[in-house]
């Protein structure tokens, strides 16, 4: 290489470094570990241990690679690359922590041989606007509440007891606090557990997640694997805090789903339906697999299922897939409009966990008519293995969903957190308060955006139906595009 | 490269053997394997760490955490490193795997004839 070229390369590297300076602020290792953590289906204690171990590995590895002459950015990228796809690694950890009975279950599922089903490691079906034919839900048990939409002010704690921090949040919201400490004990969480957080505020979900991350916990027994994280409900002027499992148990409902037509078609047997459901929808929760949250029986051509609503949605989706004709000849389809034909599309995600994206889309469907899943032929499934969404709907709705996904899955700007701007978005169709809730979920779903978090605020003017956002310019831009997409 | 499903038992044997020599943390296992095989055998971290987790869950190895002290440049402060050692159950499993490995190797030798230097070299390289 000539001196001139070296000089040019050196200058380019200098410029590259100068440009790269702001990149160092968000920790790419931390961001990658955030993604992996969100995909791990293990107990909270195990999740933290895996994260700590891989964090240590990555930092050792980056240092060794840098000793070979690479810069930190490249070394970090290479070290993360050696770990491979986060979803695949999470799946490996899932297999590594399976009990023998769950391994047997997985073997049995493998022998089922249902085409395409093997791709789906978890299933999320979006709500129908109306109850579809063949489904009736027994109106028992408490439903989920609107609590996630409530915004909590700034919370700061430096080793304060959890009980105090929760009391402050309740006081901040002007509600009464009820904590089920017994349900939290298996998570290593006690009233005196020390909390270290400094959050500018946000939804209850965001604040509780921050508390969970900044909590000093006691020993977490293996039996805590299925207890879930700290969760909450806010209704009737009461903030209830308990483990996710405790809420699951209290919110179970009894539902029946008619599968007589599916069984009569001879495509699947009762045993195969049971195996599909208990193998793919949160397997560890089913009584057949040793869980105690969900149970089902098939009697007289109907599935009787007792489970939390989200699991019942998953059962309904499975049944819907079995009911849908495998292949429809074009001449048999008589769509009302050309766009009404149902098709499928796989949308791969790069920066956001598919499960969290599905949650955002579920919420978006409650805000925007064009994003609402309105019949059981339509669904969104999560393929956690490849971190992708399988969307089955009309072409127009798939386009609308993909637009949201692309905005949210963008790598996200890396910005100076000190620079903020405000923008007011006038909404024509959607309600500003509902849009704010979806945006809160959306920002939380994107690890890069979460990491760039600034003391952003969403102010709603209900009379004008406007949303005023204060955040970094890149975040404001993304929020405005999301709001626009939700408002169409 | 190790890591394919058919070599799962081999991986387990290699990792248990390294940990039976002395306690190691994951990255040290990976590096030691690379050094001993002169870079020919590489256990990728995406395979190694889930394997360590599996062995630990099965009670074959036991992990303990160490707080990493800051180095001269102040790096490492606050990090935690997990060291593994083989348990009595793990040693028993290792001996079983080793016996099975030797028996299989003896069987192959008996079938294909005595090992020659050239064949041995090629066999090692392809592993």
Image: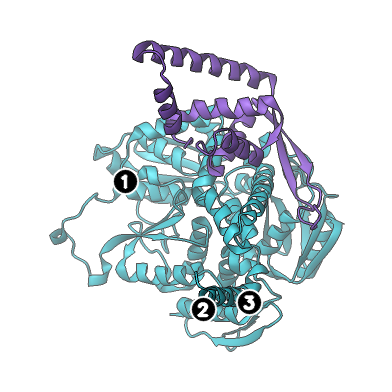
Chain colours: A cyan, B purple
The residue that mark 2 highlights is A483
Residue A211 visible to an observer of this rendering? yes
Whether residue A271 can be seen here: no
User: Residue at label 3?
Assistant: A18
Where residue A52 appears, x then y in whole percent? Answer: 69, 47
| Above or below, comparing residue A256 to residue A69 in the picture | above
Do tag 1 and tag 3 residues touch (Cβ < 8 Å)? Answer: no
Q: Position of residue B75 (x, y in %)?
A: 76, 56
A395 relative position to A212: left or right:
left
Q: How many marks?
A: 3
Residue farthest along the left direction in this orientation = A331
Q: Quadrant of the C terminus of chain A?
A: bottom left
- Tell me where residue B123 appears, x and y as whole percent: 42, 27
Mark carried by residue A322: 1
Q: Nearer the viewer, residue A76 or A383?
A: A76
Q: Up-down: is B73 above or below B106?
A: below
- From the viewer's perspective, is residue A38 above or below residue A13? above
Residue found 56% across the figure and 40% down from its top: A93
Q: Quadrant of residue A477?
A: bottom right
Residue A23: x %, y % from top left: 62, 70
Mark found first going from the N terminus, 1 or 3: 3
Q: Are marks 1 and 2 on the same chain?
A: yes
Q: Callout 1: few (<14), some (14-19), or many (20+) C-alpha neighbours within 10 Å?
A: some
**Alpha carbon distance from label 2 to label 3:** 34 Å
Q: Residues within 10 Å of mark 3 (few under 14, many from 20)?
A: few
Q: Chain of mark 3?
A: A
Cα separation, mark 1 vs mark 3, equals 56 Å
């Amino acid at each position: 290489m000539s001196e001139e070229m070296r000089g040019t390369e050196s200058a380019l590297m200098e410029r590259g470094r100068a440009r790269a300076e702001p990149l160092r602020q968000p920790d790419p290792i931390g961001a990658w570990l955030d993604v992996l953590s969100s995909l791990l289906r293990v107990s909270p204690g195990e999740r933290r241990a895996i994260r700590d171990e891989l964090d240590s590995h990555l930092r050792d590895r980056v240092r060794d690679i840098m000793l070979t002459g690479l810069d930190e950015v490249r070394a970090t990228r290479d070290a993360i690359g050696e770990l491979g796809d986060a979803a695949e690694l999470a799946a490996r950890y899932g297999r590594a922590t399976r009990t023998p009975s769950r391994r047997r279950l997985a073997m049995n599922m493998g022998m089922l041989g249902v085409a395409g089903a093997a791709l789906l490691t978890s299933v999320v079906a979006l709500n129908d606007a109306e109850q579809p034919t063949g489904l009736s839900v027994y109106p028992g048990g408490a439903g989920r509440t609107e609590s996630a939409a409530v915004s909590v002010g700034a919370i700061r704690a430096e080793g304060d007891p959890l009980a105090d921090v929760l009391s402050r949040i309740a006081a901040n919201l002007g509600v009464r606090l009820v904590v089920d400490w017994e349900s939290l004990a298996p998570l290593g969480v006690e009233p005196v557990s020390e909390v270290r957080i400094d959050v500018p505020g946000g939804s209850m979900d965001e604040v509780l997640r921050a508390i969970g991350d900044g909590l000093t916990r006691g020993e977490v027994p293996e039996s805590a694997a299925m207890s879930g994280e700290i969760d909450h409900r806010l209704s009737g002027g009461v903030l209830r805090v308990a483990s996710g499992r405790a809420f699951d148990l209290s919110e179970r409902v009894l539902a029946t789903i008619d599968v007589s037509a599916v069984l009569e078609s001879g495509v699947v047997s009762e045993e195969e339906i049971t195996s599909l459901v208990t193998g793919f929808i949160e397997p560890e929760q089913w009584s057949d697999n040793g869980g105690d949250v969900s149970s089902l029986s098939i009697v007289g051509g109907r599935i009787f299922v007792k489970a939390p609503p989200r699991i019942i949605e998953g059962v309904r989706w499975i049944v819907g897939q079995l009911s849908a004709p495998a292949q429809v000849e074009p001449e048999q389809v008589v769509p009302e409009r050309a766009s009404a034909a149902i098709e499928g599309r796989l949308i791969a995600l790069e920066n956001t966990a598919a499960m969290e994206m599905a949650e955002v889309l579920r919420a978006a469907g409650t805000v925007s008519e064009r994003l609402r899943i309105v019949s059981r032929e339509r669904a969104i499934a999560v393929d956690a293995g490849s971190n992708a969404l399988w969307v089955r709907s009309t072409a127009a709705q798939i386009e609308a969903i993909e637009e949201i996904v692309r905005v949210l899955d963008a790598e996200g700007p890396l910005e100076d957190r000190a620079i903020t701007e405000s923008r007011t978005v006038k909404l024509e169709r959607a309600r500003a308060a509902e849009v704010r809730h979806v945006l809160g979920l959306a920002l939380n779903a994107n690890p890069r955006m979460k990491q760039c978090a600034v003391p952003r605020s969403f102010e709603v003017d209900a009379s004008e139906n406007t949303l005023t956002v204060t955040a970094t310019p890149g975040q404001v831009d993304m929020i405005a595009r999301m709001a626009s997409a939700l408002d169409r | 490269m190790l890591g394919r499903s058919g070599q799962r038992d081999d991986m387990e044997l290699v990792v248990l053997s390294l940990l039976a020599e002395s306690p190691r943390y994951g990255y040290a296992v990976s590096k030691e394997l690379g050094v001993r095989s002169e870079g020919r055998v590489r256990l990728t971290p995406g395979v190694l760490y889930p394997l360590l987790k599996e062995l630990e869950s099965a009670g074959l190895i036991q992990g303990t955490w160490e707080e990493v002290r800051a180095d001269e440049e102040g790096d490492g402060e606050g990090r935690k490193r997990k060291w593994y050692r083989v348990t009595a159950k793990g040693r028993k499993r290792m001996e079983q795997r080793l016996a099975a490995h030797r028996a299989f190797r003896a069987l192959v030798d008996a079938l294909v004839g005595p090992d020659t230097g050239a064949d041995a070299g090629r066999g090692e390289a392809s592993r």
